[in-house]
Amino acid sequence: MTTHPQLLVHGKADNVGVVVVEGLTAGTDMLCVCTEDNSDFRLTAKADIPIGHKVALQDLQAGDTVLKYGEDIGKMVGAAERGGHVHTHNLKTKRW
C-alpha cells in the first residue's frame, strides 16, 4: 500500500476528489486525503483515471450537483458510481 496520497479531497462536504498521480488504474486501492482536516480514507478506483480528473466519492446520478472546494462546480449529466471517473463526459457546468 502506498503512503503517498493518490486522491485529494478539499472539504468534507465535497462529493468528488482530484487524482494527483499519473497512471491511476482501475482497481487501485487509493489513499485519499481530505485537506480540510488532514484526515484520510481509502477508495477503489473503478476506472483508469488521468491526473487532474475527478473521482466520485459517492454514487452520483444525472442531475446531481457536484461539490468541489465546498462549491457547486456543475451537475452530473450521466452517472458515476463511487470510485468512478467524473469529467466532461458526465459533468457539465450550470453556466451554459
Image: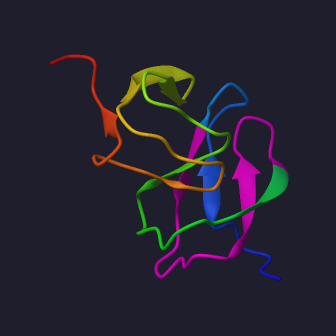
Q: In this image, 44 relative to 51: left or right?
A: right
Q: Is residue 28 above or below residue 36?
A: below
| Residue farthest toward the left in the current orientation of the protein | 96
Q: Position of residue 53 (x, y in %)?
A: 41, 56
Q: Which residues are magenta?
A: 16-39
Q: Which quadrant of the rendered structure holds the C terminus?
A: top left
Q: Is residue 8 above or below residue 50?
A: above
Image point 63% across, 56% down: which residue?
83
Q: Position of residue 89 (x, y in %)?
A: 29, 48
- Residue 84 or 73: which is nearer the viewer? 84
Q: In this image, 34 relative to 51: left or right?
A: right
Q: Position of residue 20 (x, y in %)?
A: 52, 65
Labels in figure, total? 0
- Residue 62 or 44: which is nearer the viewer? 62
Q: Position of residue 78 (x, y in %)?
A: 39, 39
Q: Is residue 30 above or below residue 70?
A: below
Q: Which quadrant of the rendered structure holds the N terminus?
A: bottom right
